[in-house]
Amino acid sequence: MELIKRHKALTAVLSLLTLLGVGCWVYQLMFGLSVTGMSNSVSWGLYITMFMFFVGLSAGGLIVASSASVFHIKRFKAVAMPAIILSTVCICLAGMFVLIDLGGIWNVWRMLTGPNFMSPLMWDMCVITLYLVINILYLVNMKKGNDRAVSVISRFALPCAILVHSVTAWIFGLQIAKEGWYSAIMAPIFVASAMDSGLALLLCALAALKKAKVFNTSKDLFASLAGLLATCIAVDAFFIFCEVLTMAYPGAAGAETLAIMTGGPTAPFFWFEIIGGLAVPFCVLVFAKNREKAGLVIGSSALVIAGVLCKRLWLLFTSFVVPNVQGAPGIATDAGWAMAGAYAPTLPELAIVIGVVSLGGLGFMALSGALLVPAAETETVPARAAKPAAELDFDPQTA
């Protein structure tokens, strides 16, 4: 709570936005999902977009933290706690967006009393619950300094982090009726974007915590994480290239969907993600000198996060542009196919989304203030030369 007390203005703004979001959510409960921009032709909107987005942000943080124990990467252990805090907050926000999209909390009862285990949606609910439990156990044992328990939990955390985003991808990838979603590499695409967006958010959070004098990250570690981000961006770009190439190949079935992505209503999101979210950050971070400049790393990380958000937008809405059944009940056809798949979020939707994100900001500040070691304390660690040779994080042969 110390961090919240020290930044009263930011806390007040986030609290006000959270209360506004709660008010709009109550308004939605009273009048139903008709207050949103969703319709029969576009049944998933901004809430599901943000759900996908925050699941990815959460998975990326937990993968970095658990890799420190699983693969014995000593450097990453230094940022394991803020990574887990970030992961926990993000998965809670993802779950909140699912509950909001249901239209009413009482609909959760139907999911519990009549589960359909053939549905990926049910798989997702189970794995997200498990994921949250693992995050909480991770936080508790790290705070207690129980390294043995942390090591055991990390063995389960890493595959669960990959699974949680894979299951989310299968919700879309197994939809044979939607050409833009039905793909065997949808899960790898989601996992790759989770890695780069989650790592980018972690870098931004570490920079903010350092500036607030809550947690200190060394320049070497910050640059190392930026290098890993460049690698993740390259992998993400490769998977997208494979998908686009398959759709663009002469005679392929995805030509119409690709045309909408590159020149249709969702084209601005697609091209921003390709240029701003992948090409530009990679060209910046691929050079070691740039990775040593905090401003360039933070700017590139922000572009990656925005690019992945744009990816979620074009991925979701491209397949809604053309309805499966033209002229189906509840779908307007007077204005043509473009009108049939039209969607724009309403003010209540936007206010609810901003409110949920603001609540996440408050949660991150509270947990960081309670669980992280202040920067002044981390800076008093003995110098490298005073450490035993076995603990030094370098190869003596190259020293």
Image (cartoon, rainbow, N blue to C red):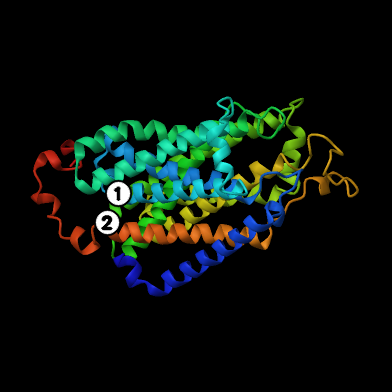
Answer above or below: position of 348 versus 190. Answer: below
Image mark count: 2
Q: Is residue 396 rendered to the left or right of residue 106?
A: left
The amino acid beneath tag 1 is: Met
Q: Is residue 227 left or right of residue 396?
A: right
Q: Name the residue nearer the viewer: 264 or 278.
A: 264
> Looking at the image, is 219 positioned above or below residue 338?
below
The residue at which mark 1 appears reads as 81
Write down the residue under mark 2: 372
Rendering coords of residue 336 (x, y %) = 88, 46
The amino acid sitting under disc 2 is: Leu
- Is the residue 238 above or below the residue 252 in the image? below
Q: Nearer the viewer, residue 63 or 20?
A: 20
For the residue labelled by badge 1, is the local secondary structure a helix, a strand or a loop? helix
Question: In terms of depth relative to the viewer, which is nearer, 321 or 282?
Answer: 321
Q: Earlier in the sequence, mark 1 or mark 2?
A: 1
Residue 364 is drawn in which quadrant?
bottom left
Q: Badges 1 and 2: C-beta atoms under 8 Å apart?
A: yes
Residue 392 located left or right of residue 27 = left
Residue occupying the point 14% across, 50% down: 384
Residue 335 place in picture, x, y as percent: 89, 50
Residue 143, percent across and down?
23, 49
Q: Judge the density around disc 2: few (<14), some (14-19), many (≥20) Cα neighbours within 10 Å.
A: some
